[in-house]
Amino acid sequence: MDLHLTDEQAALLLAELDRIIDGARYPLSPRIRALREIRALLKPYPERPPPAPPQKPYEPPSRGQYRRRRG
C-alpha cells in the first residue's frame, strides 16, 4: 500500500499520531506500538550519533616512581 500524501497532509497526519502517542494512558499497549511503527514509516527517527570511544581505564601510578628516598 503506497500513500501519496502532500506535504501538508503528511504533516497533519504526523501531528495527529504524535498527539495520540504522547497522550496515551498505556504507552506500551499494542495499539500505541502499532501507531509508533506507522509513524516511523512516515517519518523515520534521525540516526543516533556513533557512541563515544571507550575511556582509558584508570591505572594507579606505579609505586617505584614515587618511592621516598631514604638517606
Image (cartoon, rainbow, N blue to C red):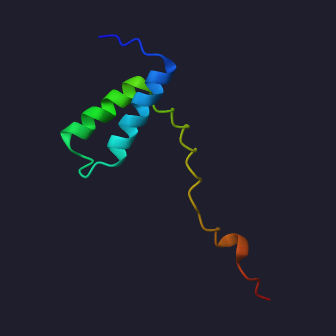
Q: Position of residue 32 (x, y in %)?
A: 26, 40
Q: Residue at x 33, y 49 (%)?
A: 23
Where is residue 60 drawn, in percent x and y?
60, 68
Where on the picture, by quarter, is residue 36? Answer: top left
Q: Nearer the viewer, residue 60 or 4?
A: 4
Could you tell me which quadrant the N terminus lies in?
top left
Q: Please state the horizontal and vertical placement of residue 45, each as a whole percent of the image.
A: 46, 32
Near-viewer residue (27 or 63)? 27
- Is residue 18 shown left or right of residue 46? left
> Residue at left 29%, top 33%?
35
Which residue lies most toward the right here?
Answer: 71
Q: Furthest residue to the left?
A: 30
Quarter placement of the C terminus: bottom right
Provide residue 27's location: percent of width, then percent of height: 27, 48
Q: Residue at the location (36% across, 35% down)? A: 17
* Quarter-of-image position of residue 3: top left
Picture layout, residue 68 above or below residue 44: below
Whether residue 42 is situated above or below residue 20 in the rendered picture? above
The one of 48 and 51 positioned closer to us in this rendering: 48
Q: Is residue 52 left or right of residue 9?
A: right
Instruction: Note whether 66 is above or below 37 in the view shown.
Output: below
x 58%, y 52%: residue: 55
